[in-house]
Image: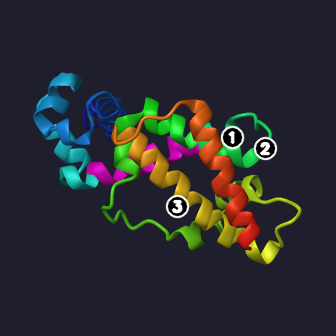
Amino acid sequence: MPPKEKVSKVRVSDTAFEMTREYGFSSVTARKLAERLGCSTQPIFRAYENMDELRTDLFYMSTDYFLTRLLSKKTRTPAYMSLAMSYIEFAKKEKNLFELIASVDDFGTQTLAEFLKSEEGEQLLGKVSTASVPDTKRQELFTMFWMFVHGMASLIAGNRIECSDREIRTYITKAYEGFVSRI
């Protein structure tokens, strides 16, 4: 019977996830990860062919972490505001995970249109639609709204703009109302 593996793939990815949260993925090296795990780099490369493969797993872990937090939150009224503020709060408090999620790298992810057809996507669509928006226009509204919110979150996370929560809410309300009026 082969000896039990001391450093599992789950342990490697969980430890790398925590390091990414603390320092950002660009600071996670095989050597630093091995040091944190208390092993050589061999178990890391037994679990992952290379650091790019680990980064892809971390992207999906970060996305799942965010979506789980977002969808489990109690919705404030209006729901679109809760969605937007949760995303911006995530960008502020989890800058390193947000940086990975917002990365322009292609991780083989779905397009926004494909994502909106998933169960999670349908839940998010429900958060931005109102009775005045026909079902056929929900996706268009969400896409416009999400581009605005994502841009705002990126600017705030990157320290490119400073806004109070009140200012953020005002901008979001104006953008949302403007999008709804154009649909």
Q: Give the secondary structure at mark 2.
A: loop
Q: Which residue is mark 2?
A: 78
Q: Which residue is mark 1?
A: 82
First to last magenta residue range: 54-68
Q: Is residue 78 left or right of residue 45?
A: right
Quadrant for residue 122, please give it: bottom right
Q: Earlier in the sequence, mark 3 or mark 2?
A: 2
State the quadrant of the N terminus. Answer: top left
Q: CA distance from mark 1 to mark 2?
A: 7 Å
Q: Amino acid at mark 3?
A: Met
Give the residue at the far bottom of this rendering.
Answer: 136
Q: Give the secondary structure at mark 1.
A: helix
Q: Which residue is mark 3?
A: 147
Give the residue at the far right of this rendering.
Answer: 131
Q: Is residue 22 left or right of residue 41?
A: right
Circles 1, 2 touching at the beta carbon (< 8 Å): yes
Predominant secondary structure in magenta? helix
Depicted 41 relative to depicted 59: above or below: above
Q: CA distance from mark 3 to mark 2?
A: 19 Å
Residue 127: x %, y % from top left: 74, 52
Q: Nearer the viewer, residue 139 or 141?
A: 141
| Residue 64 shows up from this direction | yes
**Residue 178 among those drawn in magenta:** no
Residue 158: x %, y % from top left: 33, 41
Quadrant for residue 178, please give it: bottom right
Q: Is residue 132 left or right of residue 169?
A: right
Q: Give the secondary structure at mark 3.
A: helix
